[in-house]
Each structure stands twice: as structure tokens, then as C-alpha cells.
Amino acid sequence: MALEANYNSKSVEDKWYSYWMKHDFFHSEIDEREPYTIVIPPPNVTGVLHMGHMLNNTIQDVLIRRARLKGLNACWVPGMDHASIATEAKVVAKLKEDGIDKSDLTREEFLKHAWDWTDEYGGVILEQLKKLGASCDWARTKFTLDDNMSQQVIKSFVDLYNKGLIYRGYRMVNWDPEAKTTLSDEEVNYVEKQGNFYYISYKIQGSDETLTIATTRPETIFGDTAICINPNDDRFTHLKGKKAIVPICNRVVPIIEDEYVDVELGTGCLKVTPAHDINDKMLGDKHKLEVIDIFNEDASLNSFGMHYEGKDRFVARKEVTKELESLGVLIKTEQHLNKVGTSERTKAVIEPRLSDQWFLKMEDLVKPAIKAVLEEDDVVLHPKKFESTYRHWLSNIRDWNISRQLWWGQQIPAYFYGDGKEDFVVAENLEMAVSLAKEKTGNSDLTSAHLKQDPDALDTWFSSWLWPMSVFDGLNNPENEEFKYYYPTNDLVTGPDILFFWVARMIIAGFEYTGKRPFKNVYLTGLVRDKEGRKMSKQLGNSPDALKLIEEYGAGGVRVGLLLSSAAGNDLMFDEALCQQGKAFGNKIWNAYKLTQLWEVSDNIEQPASSALAIKWYQSKMGETLEEMEDHYSKYRISDALMSTYKLIWGDFCSSFLEMVKPAYGSPIDHKTYQQVIAIFEDNLRIVHPFMPFLTEELWHEISERSPEGALIINHWPENKDIDKELITDFDFAAEVISGIRTIRKEKNIPMKDAISLSVINSESVSTETDVIISKLGNISEINYITEALDGALTFRVKSNEYFVPMEGAINIEEEIAKLSEELKYTEGFLRSVQGKLKNEKFVSGAPEQVVANERKKEADAIAKIETIKTSLASLK
RNA sequence: GGGCGCUUAGCUCAGUUGGUUCAGAGCACUUGGUUUACACCCAAGGGGUCGGGGGUUCGAAUCCCUCAGCGCCCACCA
């Protein structure tokens, strides 16, 4: 059947994806082969495919497909993350639309809604990944909130608690008043905001004196429990031991001294609000100050806010300012740029808040993770530069707040039997909790009815940090065969933005639970930006619709487009033109195949010498490229591996090789050459397959009818080739000669179809083997070897070889002389610089022999070339 | 404030230990092409004092110092 004029991705992609699925080619089972495992960075269940996912998953698919071709037992485990904050926020919003308030629901009711939402809207992203061609082992799909997965999370919590690593603490945490939950430090972004410095004067008790403090948050004066001055600050020495009166609420607070206060900043006088500022909390602890929390959960003021009770903090700020002004205690306001912590998810301004939370001690846990990456290269980050960031974070790590005031997630397995701080037990389930509680209290009458489970859920990352283990049930059952076979995994591909959230923590968990790394290599991709370098975001609307791109350019086009300029760790400036380039590449391959199918194949002709030689050359060339690719892949330079392939196929195969073996118009091709070309084409498909899986599978089956066992996806990587370096050098030389001929043809308007003759003074003693190629690609009727310059001919030089194209009459003597003079001048200049170097005693004695020998060769070449040019000039004149 | 990194052709980037193949690639650009696979094409070509300055060296894109610009991470000031 005749092939379509151009490659049409639409009619091909779905077909082959179903075919691969139908034959279970993505599925991996334990066998005698070496495993190659990747666990997907589980996208949020709320997620929709965006450019970052496409890049990330394309890279994973390239790695997994290549591993499959290399004969490894490739297993790519897909899944999703329950993303507690993001999902809960979505569900709350959805309920609100339906007129339901979360606070009116019980936990069970809410969770029912959340699961309904998940079933209905969640997981689209996995379907979208299929469009991209992702060859995940779908039978292994996991969700971090699956029973089995949750069980493992709970188990690890109990385990870490029993090891004394998890504790409960009353700490200052980052409070998101919108989501009404705690955030980890990593989930807080500091954003520059224009604010004010308010200068407020406080009366000194028992005197007419006042002192002025500067604050950015006047509404927090209700929580003031001290004024702090620097003991070394002479301006305030007289206030030592006195008390100040807080305006509006007229609270009398002590004036304390601490060197923490910066004399330069503000007025050198600080109001201390231990409940609402981390540093103030530190001062409060040190000086045993009272702690007054003035906010409700939603950051509106509580009763301590007096007549501002119930008002939002920002509203209160304005109104308090007004009142202070009317009281005459607001001295002035100044503009002040400061960085405000905001929630990564809800964008709400974070409120530092004291509360009971669960923490994981990190200090000892991180030790093996530091060693593995920084000392032993047991886990390798690509690119290496991220190791310093990694070191910095791990060596300054703080305890991890793992509790969240949410319902969507694993509920903390702590069961309270009383109101005391220590009146709880930690157990895997209620039943075990009861027996533990009985033991702890000595009260044998205690029943489950007396126990109340902590309402909070665990941080999402507290489940995903187990991911490489939990997907293989490694915590429930560490001795299971699959876990032993697939773990540790090989490569992890993810963005540097979650290096701490996730990557580092997986390494920590891996060592804690298995004593082994969770993966060998971490490939950190860059951010996908638009071509102006801006981050892609919904607000800017600069993020292209991933599925539309696939529709327009084909999955292969998009994959190639994304990979073309994405060095590991570097941001990628995405431009649709790259997809166009990717699509064009696919089309090029398609048409190359089409060409071979237009040939008439004959058994009755011998293989021409040119074809035999061309085949030998291309094999060498491919062998060279295979080595190059191997090197690139080993360094995770996927973009470079693709570029090597691209140049080999487009340049060497299409532009050179096919032209060399192409039969003359109207003539058939010999059977042997045809067979060899097809075999070579198959090798090409093998190396392109990881990048363009659909197109290559399509052509693979176009070449011949194949059984499912013969499908390309499970075929094999090309074998190593014998590389004839000399032949490659000879062809490079020949290419320059051909280029010279083409230039002359172009300059003199000699059509390609008119054969011309060529004479050469072979000073370089170049092999004549490639003459057949030169003749064919230059349409040369004959090549004559001569020793004397030819009169009345156009000339060009390659190294010190001189070539003549006889062209009586068509030669413009003046032009030729000018051209030659120019070349002479340049070569003489070049010779002077080389000789300058060689005359330098220090160079000759100091530089390595090889370098000096090379300069001498350059000198000799230049002298020879100057000779030939001079001879030519003389003959022209 | 602390740390890391970047600056090479119009754009996106390679350039491993200083010296053959070092000034490169892809794209874009210019010019010329309906040769019967592909105009999503072919051929030829132009283009950079390697951010500025200084230093080490026989020799520097590469090593050192300095200045300028940009990016990221961490901490954070009331």
C-alpha cells in the first residue's frame, strides 16, 4: 500500500498505544533479567497535564524505553498523590459552590465527598500521559491514599514514634488562615510586599515619659507582653526595670533587655508579641513572658482584640491605626518594603502561630542521606551542582512538622484517653491502641469508647517520602520478592523545586528502612518557561495546552521539541517552533522510508562499489554515534543524545547516505544494497524509538509484517559496529571536495544534471577509494590525477590538494586571480603565525611534543598550499 | 545578610584535566534551487575581540583577582 505523503500522527498514535497495551508490553514481572525501575513522581490527583509534566515524563519514557531495548526488565511504576492541602481546598470549594460548608460536615461525610470528587475528577492526568506515549506499567498504578499505601504510612509513623523520633510539641508554626492548617517551612514563600512601619508611642508607667517603637503590625499590640531594648543602648539605659503601658488595651508590660534588638533598626525599641512572631517567642521563652494569642483560626481577632473582636487582621490593622492616630500615639508611618510569608497553595499570608503539632526529629535521620550523596556517590544528582544545595539544606535541617489540620490524608494514629499532654498512645489501629492504653494507664476497663483519635492528618510528603518502597509494599512486607527485585530503583526524574520536599526525604526514608538508597540517579529537570523566559502560569496564560500541542505536532513532535534544548537542570525556554522541528524530524524519517519504497529492486544487477562503500561508511558513522549516545545517556544528557541521533539521521543518513546509494533515475536498485539499506533503516528506528515511539513502531511494521513478539518496543538496541576511523576521515575529506564542486556549480550556474570532469593534484595522497562517491554526488564524469596545474580551469583546494574543473571560456580571469590572491594572503598570514610560535624557544621546549609536532605539520601544509596557489596564479597570468 | 551558579553567533546552548580536531552545534538569517522521498525540502554562505578590566603562562573561552549584569537556594529585620 502506498504510504501517505507525510507522516500523520493522528491516525497512528492511538493505534499503537492500544496495541502495546493489548500485548502487555509495559508490564513487568520478575524474571531472570536485570531490573530497571523508575517510580513516577506521582502527580497530584487534582493535576492536569502541563508542560512540566510533559518534559518530565518524556524523559522518563525515553529512559524506560531505552532500557527495555537494552534488554533490561524495565518497570515504570505510575501513580498519584493525594495532595492533601490542594485536594482538600478543591473539595471545600466545590462543596461551597453546592452550598455546603465544611464545618457542617463530619469527618466521615467530608471524606465521602472527597472520594466522590476524586473518583469523578481525579486522575485525568494519567489518561493524558498515555497520549504522550508514556509506557508505564499501569497494572501497578498506586494512589498514596490506597488502603495498602496508607497502612504503610501509619506503620512508619508508629515505628518512628516508638524509636523516639516523633514527638509532640507546642511550637510556633506557619499557619495558613485560609486553609486553616499548618504548613511546613518549605511550603511558605516569601513575597516582597509594600507595607508600612508604624511608629507608636508607649507611655512609661509612673512618668510622663514615652518611648516609641516601630512595628509593621500595629494590630498585634493586643498581644504585646513586653518592650525590649538593647542593654548596650545608652538612649534607653534610664528605662531599665520600668514598665510600659500598651495603648488601647492599657496593659502594663515590663521593659526587658536583650542583645537581640538591633540598635540601628527602627527606633531601637521593640514590642514583644510572643504568640505571633517566631523571634518574639524566643524572647518570650528567654524572659518568661506571658503569651497572649489574639487570633482565631481564620486570623480574625479574638476577645483579646477587644472591640475589634471578629475583625480580620488586615481590617483591624487599618482601624487600629486610625484609633492610635486619634489617641495621638501614632507618631508617624513610613513606607517599608518587607518580605511576607505566604502559603504556596492558597497564597494566604502566613500567620505565625503557637500550637500543638507533631514533629519528626531529623538530626540523626539525615546522616546516611548526607553520606550517600556527598561522600559516597551512592546516589548521584544530575547535574552535580545540586549537591551543594542539597548539602546546605541537610546540614541545617530542622525538625519536620508532619501534622496538618486537614481531613484528607492519613489520620495521625495517636489516641487520647485523657486531657493531659501525655495522655495518649500511638498504635497502628484502634484495637492495638486500646490494649496499649490499658497497659499504660493500668486501667483494664478502658475501651475504644474512651479513646479519641487525633483529628489531624499527616503531611502529604510524609506518605510520598516512602513512595519507592511503598509501591512495592516494602514497609508492610520487606521480604516480599517484588520489593527485593525492583528496589532500589534506578533513576528518578523530577524538578529541583521538590529536591527537599521529596527527593531528600525519600533518600532519608530509604536508608532508615532498608539501609539502602531508594534510587541510584536523580535527574533534575529545569523549569519550563516561555520563550521570553517567564515562568509558565495560569495567571499569565502563557502555558500552552499540552493536549492541543500533541494534537497539532504529534506526541513525537512534542517530545522531541521538549527535549531539543533541555539540558539537565537548566530551565527550558519553550517555543512551539521546537515542536515544529520535532514534527519535521518525524516527517523526514517518514519520507526517507518512502523513498526506499519507490525503488524498484532487481536481482540481476551487481552492487555498485559506491553503495558497498557507502554502507561500510554509514555503519562506521552509526557506530561512532552509538558510542557518543552511550556517553550522553550515561551522563543523563538526553538532549545531547537526541541531537546526536538527529544529526546522524538527518545529515548522515538522509542527506549523505541515501544520496550515495540512490539508484539513477529510472534505474532499479540491486537487491543486496536494498536489503542493507533496510537493515540500516531498522537500526535507525531502534535508536529513534525512545524519542518518537509511535512513528518508529508504525514504520517498523510497515517494513514487514511482524508478530507481536517482533514489535519494535520490545526489540533490541543496535549491536556495536566496527568503526573504521580512517574511512570516516576519508569521507570527511570527500565531503569537502563535493562541497567545493557544488560551490563551483552554483557560482557558474552549472546544473546538477550536467556531468563535469575533475582533475586533481593529490599532494595529500588521499585515498582514491572515495572517488566513486565524489563522482556520484558531484556528478563527475571522470577524475583525473595530474601533477601539473591545469590551464583554463576553475580551481579549489582542500588542505593542500588542488582540484580543477576544466571550463574553457567560462572563466573570469580577473575574478579567479582575486580569489586566489585572497586565499594566498590568508594562508601566508596563517603561516607567519605558526612560524612565530615555532621560533619561540620557550614554546618549543615547553609545550608537549605532540603539540609542537602538530605546529610543524601545519607549517608544512601551509607551505605546500602556498606553492600550489602561486603556481595557479602564475598559470592564470 | 549567607550560599551556589550563570554571562560564548540573532536565539537556545556544547566546550571534560589550559595546547592538535577550538572558537562549535541546532535553530534563525542570506543567496540559489519544482534533480521524479520530503518546501515539514535541498545546496551554498554570512555571523562571535568567548560580559568589562587586570594577572599567571611560551600559550587562556578554560586558572587567579576585580568590576558589572542576571538567576536560583537558604535565612530573615521588628
Image (tube, coloured by chain):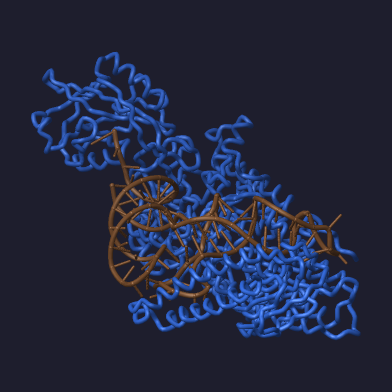
Q: Quadrant of residue A712?
A: bottom right
| Drawing shade for chain A | blue
The residue lying toward the viewer, choosing from B27 and A537, is B27
Q: Is residue A825 left or right of residue A326?
A: right
**Residue at horizontal 38%, vertical 77%?**
A839
- Residue A695: give x, y in percent of width and height: 75, 63
Query: Would residue A477 be seen by someone viewing this image from the given angle?
Result: no
Tell me if residue B44 comes above or below residue A207 in the rendering: below
Q: Is residue A873 left or right of residue A320?
A: right
Q: Residue furthest left?
A: A238
The residue lying toward the viewer, choosing from A256 and B71, is B71
Q: Quadrant of the C terminus of chain A?
A: bottom right
- Residue A339: give x, y in percent of width and height: 37, 38
**Residue at horizontal 42%, vertical 26%?**
A312
- Residue A325: give x, y in percent of width and height: 29, 16
- Residue A559: give x, y in percent of width and height: 66, 58
Query: Would residue A5 be seen by someone viewing this image from the given angle?
Result: yes
Q: Quadrant of residue A604?
A: bottom right
Q: Residue furthest top?
A: A326
Task: Report the chain shown in brown.
Answer: B
